[in-house]
Image: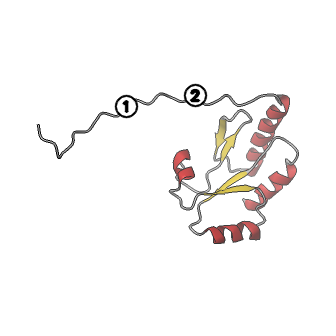
């Protein structure tokens, strides 16, 4: 998988494409060594554990999990692993971004939170 990712980064350079990794190895120095050793030159974030904040927020349950996010910030595909299919999906998404260079992601609207019901204080009686 990593050699294919390296080839994608090279093939799609100078086009609206970014590969972003999230590393969940328990030790940062070991993660950094592996990135260097494997020549993973794209941007990575460090999540510290498989239950870290990034994995939790994105609902990641298996590694690697692949999200294909378009230029508008919409997840278009998840876990496309076949290399040929992956390249087809990415080419379509990159071409769409190139046709729509002024597009900006719509701001995410915050959903109002419902107040949580107050829990009775066990120390207070009556």
Quadrant containing the C terminus is top left
Q: Is residue 19 above or below residue 101?
A: below
Residue that sits furthest to the left in the current view: 126
How many numbered marks does the figure carry?
Answer: 2
Please state the horizontal and vertical placement of residue 78, each as a whole percent of the image: 63, 43
Q: Marks 1 and 2: which is nearer the front?
A: 1
- Measured as percent of width and height from the top left, residue 28 is found at 62, 67
Label pair 1/2, CB-CB below 8 angstroms: no
Residue 115 higher or lower than 59, as above or below:
above
Q: Residue at x 65, y 29 (%)?
A: 107
Residue 12 x %, y %: 85, 47
Q: Is residue 15 above or below residue 7?
A: above
Instruction: Name the residue tied to disc 2.
Output: 109
Q: Residue at x 16, y 42 (%)?
A: 124
The quarter holding residue 34 reads bottom right
**Residue at point 56%, 46% (across, down):** 58
**Residue at the disc numbered 1:** 115
| Left or right: residue 10 compared with residue 73 | right
Please state if 42 lies on the left or on the right of 106 as rendered: right
Identify the residue at image location x=71%, y=32%: 72
What is the C-alpha distance between the residues marked 1 and 2? Answer: 18 Å
- Which image quarter: residue 113? top left
The residue at the far front in this view is 124
Q: Nearer the viewer, residue 9 or 111?
A: 111
Neighbour class for label 2 at 10 Å: few (<14), some, many (≥20)? few
Answer with left or right where residue 81 lies relative to residue 52.
Answer: right
Near mark 1 (Cα within 10 A), the count class, few <14, some 14-19 or many ≥20, is few
Mark 1 falls on what kind of element?
A: loop
Image coordinates of residue 1 in percent, x first then y, are 72, 59
Please tell me in which quadrant of the rendered image residue 95 appears.
Answer: top right
- Specify which label sits upstream in the sequence, 1 or 2: 2
């Amino acid at each position: 998988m990593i050699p294919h990712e390296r080839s994608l980064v090279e093939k799609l350079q100078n086009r609206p494409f970014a590969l972003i990794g999230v590393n969940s190895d328990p030790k940062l120095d070991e993660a950094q060594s592996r990135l260097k050793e494997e020549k993973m030159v794209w941007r990575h974030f460090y999540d510290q554990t498989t239950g870290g904040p990034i994995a939790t927020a994105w609902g990641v349950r298996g590694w690697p999990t692949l999200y294909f996010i378009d230029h508008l910030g919409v997840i278009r595909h998840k876990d496309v692993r076949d290399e040929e299919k992956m390249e087809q999906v990415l080419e379509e998404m990159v071409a769409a971004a190139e046709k729509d260079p002024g597009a900006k992601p719509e701001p995410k609207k915050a959903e109002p939170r419902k107040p949580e019901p107050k829990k009775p204080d066990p120390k207070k009686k009556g």
